[in-house]
Image (cartoon, helix red, strand yellow):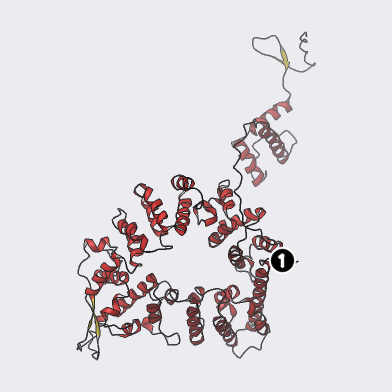
Amino acid sequence: MPIPAPTEPATGSPSTTAPGSATTRPAPAPDDVLNARTARTAAPGAAWADLVSAALLGTDRRRPPVAVRPGQAGAAALLDAAAVSTVRRRAALRPAPAGERPAPAPADPRPPLPPAARRRLSLLLADRGGAAGSRRGTAPDLTELLPQWLTAAGERGYRAPEALLPALLDAARARTDLRPAALAFAGPRALWLARLNDEWKFALRGIGSPTASPAAATPESVRRLWEEGLFAERVALLTAVRRRDRRAGLELLATTWPTERAEDRLMFVDSLREGLSSADEPFLEQALSDRSRTVRATAAELLSALPDSALAGRMAQRARTCVSLDRTVPADTSGKGQAAATGPLIVVEAPHECDAAMQRDGVAPRPPSGRGERSWWLAQLVEAAPLETWPERFGGRGPAAIIALPVADEWRTELHDAWCRAAVRQRNADWARALLGTPTAPAQPSEVSPGGSSRDPAKLLAALPEEERAAWVAEFIAAHGLSDAFRMLGICAVPWAEPLGRAVVDALDIARDAGSYPWSFSGVMGLAERCLDPAAADRLDMLTAITDEPEGASPGAGGYWSEAFQRLVGTLRLRATMHAELTPPARETP
């Protein structure tokens, strides 16, 4: 086909000649120059960011980074440039080979949720709660009911709906307290999704569940995950294997123990806390010689929780040399010229040194700031010694009788604090019961300790059986009110036993009659909404009425209390509905 001759430019239009060629082409018009300049200015990369900045700030505040034609508004020029840049950015995409298709999601054999429970979960996940500091009114707080719903669904063995898994993972990402129950409920598909979305990587680092680990799979898959998996996956795997076979778990850990990092060895040793038994003693005894101080200390703590371990025996022998019973009548037990004791007396001789053997068994040689060395060493020895050591040491006396003995030279607080820590560590109910004392007795100033301390009643109560724990707290509230009971209520089993629930409600009713505002007890009220037995809702209806305010009461307190009790009753009824929705319908017999 013949090539057509070049077209001559129109009259009045300048022409240009390419160097080395006789072919002419029309010179670009002014508009073409502007468009080309705009296209160059609106190129992808930094220029696109300039366009976005100008659009956000406005053309009145920032001059558009584009050429503006005469008579054209800056905003219009900016929009034109954005349109050209958008087309260029889209046109610049080149076809590329498709990425590797993800492996199919693993199957979850658990049964699906009943339809009503599925709708309830959707509502709970959609609720984000009110603004901070906003008044709640009488509506239940759905965000506080979500953890309870997840626990109940997990106990019934349901699987999470596939369509709600993203929202469930988003909720767990925002609230760390939801993660254990949410990941257990989401099952293996949560880990599958987490590998595809960086925002859900916490699921791989966080708490695993037995359904998410291949502990019941082939030995080859277990070994491969142990050697190649992420650290959190390995911790979850070790926990799952130990639940099935403790010896197999220790053997798996031993295969890579020498090559693990110190921080990883610490976490692996700490994971042995669940299901700790005498079968773990040889491994933990070997860990006492670990090159990491924190690993040695954790191993020693776990061994001291095993009363029959060799370390516990060594600690008992050391503690016996420091604490003994003196049956003579001393002249002065206080060192301050006070009256002499008239019976047996506990005398203490703290260690004079912290030798290498003590340090290997977990005794830290350097005390915290403000603490004496000898008292620090003594406390660690007594804390790690089996509590069975002391009845034999003190003439067959039981825990209550031992605690009642006077202690010489003001060592009483130090000694009793160490026994408190030992009772918590060894989960010894007899000693915890004796150290707690009678719930109705007035607390002595020297015995009152803040939360988290050695004397924290909540820690000692955790060593008691659930029913006894609830009864003790109920008597404490009846005698002392709610001001010091919040931590104790938090460790009681849910739903609260009837005596405990009645004691809490009675104390709240007394607080209302005293004329104070309900938000002074907002923490306890929130616990009551989540922990009271839902069957108590009808009995609490009478508390929702607005009562006459007593003389000297805070203005409007009666109405606020009515609102708070309405919310409590409504929440209890909603919890009852939630549990009913999770109950599968009974099958009709033919």
Q: Can residue 260 be seen in this view?
A: no
547 to the left or right of 245 = right
For image coordinates 27% across by 68% down, the residue present is 313
Q: Please say whether residue 404 is visible from this viewpoint.
A: yes
Q: Is residue 228 left or right of residue 156?
A: left
Q: In the depicted view, which residue is nearer to us: 475 or 44?
A: 475
The answer to whether 324 is drawn above or below residue 69 in the figure is below
Residue in the foreground of this view, choosing between 160 and 487: 160
Q: In this view, does 560 lie above or below 103?
A: below
Rendered residue at 38%/56% (across/down): 266
Residue 501 lies in quadrant: bottom right
> In screen coordinates, is 450 left or right of 156?
left
Asked whether 179 or 423 is in front, the reply is: 423
Q: Which residue is disc 1 drawn over? A: 587
- The quarter of the image holding the N terminus is top right
Q: Quadrant of residue 128?
A: bottom right
Mark 1 is on which residue type?
Answer: Arg
Residue ID at (34%, 48%): 258
Q: Could you say whether the residue bearing mark 1 is in a helix, strand or loop?
A: loop
Quarter residue 142 falls in: bottom right
Q: For the residue carrying disc 1, how many other residues have a C-alpha within 10 Å: few (<14), some (14-19), or many (20+)?
A: few
Residue 259 percent across, percent down from the top left: 35, 46
Q: Position of residue 468 (x, y in %)?
A: 48, 80
User: What quarter of the picture does the C terminus occupy?
Assistant: bottom right
Residue 493 on image: x %, y %: 53, 74
How many badges with numbers are in the image?
1
Image coordinates of residue 51 in percent, x first then y, are 64, 40
Looking at the image, residue 319 sits to the left or right of residue 184; the answer is: left
Which residue ends up furthest to the front in the rendered image? 590
